[in-house]
Amino acid sequence: MPSLVNYRGGDAEVFLRRSARLVLPFLRRADALAVPSAFLQRVFGRYDVSAEIVPNIVDVRRFRPAAAMPDRRAPRLVVARNLEALYDIGTALRAFARVRRVVPGATLVVAGSGPEHAALAALAAELGIAGATDFCGRLDREQMAELYRGACLTLNPSRVDNMPNSVLEAMASGVPVVSTDAGGVRFVLRHGVTGLMVPVGDDAAMADAALLLLADEARWRAVRDAALADVQQYTWPQIRERWSRIYAGVMSGERGEVRAA
């Protein structure tokens, strides 16, 4: 029976180091392996397993820019990741505290849920930003789209990542992204062009990048416009053809890239 494996985890390197003996024979029996980014393609390539890239999809009809510019005197920043250790929301909180010292009217919305909630709320209080930080919980897609349309910047502080939908959705919403360079993010954002990237865990660098965009409207607009153009490659009409080609190849028996390269 034809088989197609679709792997999406950003921690593939750790997973393969731990489980290669069990996983690789299975992958090499599959007819195709699809991954959403060149980052994962390279990870599997180091284990002599070939993969075809089929990126994640963003709905640009739902996630679209606001008609009006956001209020730059009281900018809203957004973090849209689950409250888990690997997403390092603490770094975003520390960065936001630095931003507030320069832009006292700034606010932060953290859209996500998870086991780190209590610890992160305590950290916000310790940093003196609890009154300016809204842990709003998990939002549905319509609510997220509305949140982005009122935002000025998105912070993505993750330590492990692949091709985060939250970054694509921010780009499509016309909200510049400041992200760590974790995993596959560098294959989505072009530093200084479609977003700004900083080292993992560096709250000072994240704050500096955010302040750079908040202080320079021309740069903010340039990043937003470049991201809006780039994100069009991740729409369904573009990605559908890739999936169709892979499935057709698997069903016809003409594929085999997942076997040892």
Image (cartoon, rainbow, N blue to C red):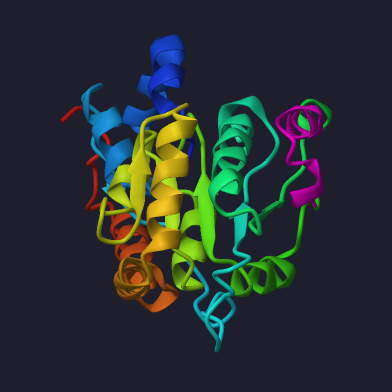
Q: Is residue 249 left or right of residue 95?
A: left
At 59% from the left and 64% from the top, the residue drawn is: 75
At 39% from the left and 34% from the top, the residue drawn is: 182
Write down the quadrant of residue 114 in the picture: top right
Tell me how many marks there are.
0
Examine the structure image and report whether residue 124 is included in the region drawn in magenta. yes
Q: Is residue 224 left or right of residue 156?
A: left
At 22% from the left and 23% from the top, the residue drawn is: 46
Examine the structure image and report whether residue 149 is included in the region drawn in magenta. no
Q: Check the image and report above or below for 152 versus 103.
A: below
Determine if residue 41 is in view.
Answer: yes
Write down the quadrant of residue 219 in the picture: bottom left
Task: Name the residue nearer the viewer: 228 or 187.
Answer: 228
Q: Residue furthest bottom?
A: 67
Task: Name the residue nearer the viewer: 165 or 16.
Answer: 165
Q: Position of residue 121 (x, y in %)?
A: 80, 34
At 55% from the left and 89% from the top, the residue drawn is: 67
Task: Name the residue nearer the viewer: 237 or 195.
Answer: 195
Q: Position of residue 258 (x, y in %)?
A: 27, 36
Q: Is residue 32 left or right of residue 83?
A: left
Q: Position of residue 74 (x, y in %)?
A: 63, 65
Determine if residue 31 is in view.
Answer: no
Q: Check the image and report above or below for 139 versus 221.
A: above
Q: Quadrant of the image for the C terminus?
A: top left
What stretch of residues is rendered in magenta?
A: 120-135
* Prevailing secondary structure of the magenta residues: helix
Q: Is residue 9 left or right of residue 52?
A: right
